């Protein structure tokens, strides 16, 4: 009898010790579906219930496109995202691209986004506005504003961006308009799947002399896996690039998610792994 009571006391002490450690453990880890970057063509914001700092590495392979990772070839990006408090999110990245001709180029970008609706809890609706600056692969600087929108639930999520960019070059448009939207549904466990669409240089629908070659669209699958109590999350997206309109101006090397190379259609595939540093 005494041995049974002693055994029960030991089990109770061990259980209480483990339960006491669980909150601090879970705060530094991802909950199910709590991905650092669920969509690869849309930027999302952090909240007090999401990782405060994450580091991500992504790669892109494209043909007949020019994107933020390079021109027409293989490109790499390293990004840091952090929660600054008071619903502010900081995002900075650096890109290194390897073109098919053997040349290399780099680009950098940094921005700060604040949620004005939501942003305190992970689940529910969030709307934010951000400001940033970048230097593209042709060493042209630009400033931009981004509007973010998202809705998260335990079983599905939707998110999108609307970006207005002003490049400091005479051969660029006065304002470039870039939009994106993605939807994912929980398939099993922490695995989400859906679809993502991107529209770039949409001013090409009403400007025949659009400086980046015309309006372009991408539509393809979107996958995300963020296992419970793991510091890692994984994302994959991409698809064909369609040119909805064409202008007489050849495409530039502006930072574009799907870009343009001449007037041909192409495709882009992107993969990302993110690591949550924690608080």
Image (spheres, grey):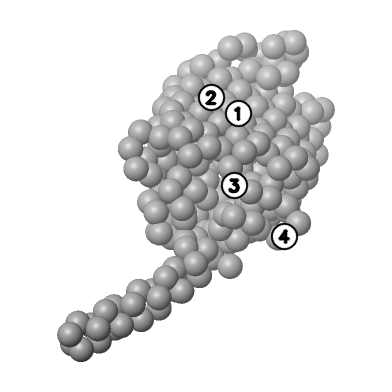
Residue at image mark 1: 180
Q: Badge 1: few (under 14), some or many (20 or more) residues near its Cα, within 10 Å?
A: many
Callout in the foreground (2, 4): 4
Residue at image mark 2: 197
- Residue sitting nearer the eye, 165 or 158: 158
Callout in the foreground (3, 1): 3
Q: Are marks 1 and 2 in contact (CB under 8 Å)?
A: yes
How far separated are the C-alphas under marks 1 and 4? 26 Å
Disc 1, SS: strand
Which is nearer the N-term, disc 2 or disc 4? 4
Q: Badge 2: few (under 14), some or many (20 or more) residues near its Cα, within 10 Å?
A: many
Disc 2, SS: strand
How far separated are the C-alphas under marks 2 and 3? 23 Å
Above or below: residue 113 compared with residue 52:
above
For image coordinates 38% across by 44% down, the residue present is 190
205 with respect to 57 (left or right): right
Callout in the foreground (1, 4): 4
Asked if one can make out residue 61 in the rendered structure from this viewpoint, the answer is: no
Q: Position of residue 63 (x, y in %)?
A: 43, 29
Q: Are marks 3 and 1 in contact (CB under 8 Å)?
A: no
Asked if one can make out residue 16 in the rendered structure from this viewpoint, the answer is: yes
């Amino acid at each position: 009898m005494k041995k049974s009571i002693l055994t029960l006391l030991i089990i109770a002490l061990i259980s209480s010790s483990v339960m006491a450690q669980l909150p601090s453990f879970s705060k530094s880890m991802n909950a199910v579906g709590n991905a650092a970057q669920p969509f690869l063509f849309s930027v999302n914001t952090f909240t007090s219930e999401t990782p405060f700092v994450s580091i991500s590495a992504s790669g892109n392979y494209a043909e007949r496109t020019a994107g933020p990772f390079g021109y027409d070839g293989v490109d790499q990006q390293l990004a840091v995202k952090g929660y600054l408090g008071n619903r502010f999110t900081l995002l900075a990245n650096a890109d290194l691209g390897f073109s098919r001709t053997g040349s290399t180029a780099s680009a950098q970008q940094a921005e700060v986004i604040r949620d004005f609706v939501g942003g305190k809890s992970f689940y529910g609706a969030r709307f934010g506005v951000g400001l940033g600056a970048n230097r593209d692969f042709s060493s042209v600087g630009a400033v931009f504003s981004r509007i973010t929108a998202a809705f998260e639930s335990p079983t599905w999520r939707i998110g999108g961006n609307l970006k207005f960019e002003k490049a400091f070059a005479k051969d660029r448009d006065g304002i470039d308009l870039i939009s994106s939207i993605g939807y994912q549904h929980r398939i099993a466990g922490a695995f989400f799947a859906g679809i993502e669409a991107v529209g770039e240089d949409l001013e090409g629908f009403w400007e025949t002399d659009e400086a980046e070659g015309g309006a372009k669209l991408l539509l393809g699958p979107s996958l995300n896996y963020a296992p419970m109590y793991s510091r890692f999350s994984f994302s994959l997206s991409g698809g064909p690039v369609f040119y909805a309109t064409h202008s007489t101006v050849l495409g530039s090397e502006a930072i574009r998610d799907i870009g343009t190379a001449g007037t041909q259609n192409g495709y882009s595939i992107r993969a990302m792994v993110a690591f949550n540093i924690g608080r």
